[in-house]
Amino acid sequence: MSIETLDLEKFESKTANLYESIVVVSKRSRQINDSIKLELNQRLEPIIAKETEDDTIMNQDKLNISLEFEKRLKPTIQSIHEIMDDKLEFRFKNEEEGK
């Protein structure tokens, strides 16, 4: 996997400053990671339930699912792409409380 450079000025322009951009991206990354964990657990659950029958087939199924998830973009990279492509909407809690 190659490393992409990031234009910090463009990244900073998405929010009030660079630190807010980092916080927004990190919170979105955590959301993506949590949904990936949930999806992985849901897909592995039926395999783990049948695991006592034949371990070699089940291990291959688990391996295939794991490899599929490893090929995906990392949550941090996904969230950076979302904010850079203006696909990420966010608001701060203090803006919500002021209304």
Image: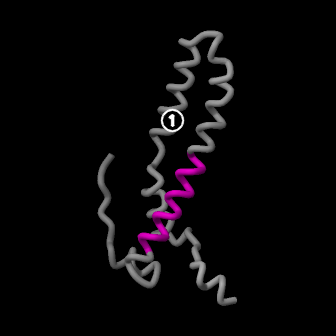
- In the image, is residue 35 part of the stretch drawn in magenta? yes
Percent of width and height locating residue 32: 55, 54
Q: Residue at label 1?
A: 68
**For the view shown, which residue lies furthest in the bottom direction?**
98
Residue 6 image-quadrant placement: bottom left
Percent of width and height locating residue 45: 66, 30
In the picture shown, does residue 79 fall above or below 41? below
Quadrant placement of the C terminus: bottom right
Of residues 64 and 17, the one nearer the viewer is 17
Q: Which residues are magenta?
A: 21-36
- Label 1 SS: helix
Q: What secondary structure predominates along the stretch shown in magenta?
A: helix
Of residues 22 and 10, the one nearer the viewer is 22
Percent of width and height locating residue 60: 52, 19
In the picture shown, does residue 16 fall above or below 54? below
Relative horizontal placement of residue 73, taking residue 56 as reference (left or right): left
* Residue at x 46% of width, y 63% of height: 26
- In the image, is residue 40 part of the stretch drawn in magenta? no
- Name the amino acid, label 1: Glu
* Residue at x 44% of width, y 77% of height: 20
**For the view shown, which residue lies furthest in the top direction?**
54
In the picture shown, does residue 2 fall above or below 47? below
* Residue at x 54% of width, y 31% of height: 65
Percent of width and height locating residue 29: 49, 58
Disc 1 residue crowd, few under 14, some 14–19, many 20+, Cα 10 Å: few
Q: How is the image coloured?
A: one colour
In the picture shown, does residue 19 fall above or below 62? below
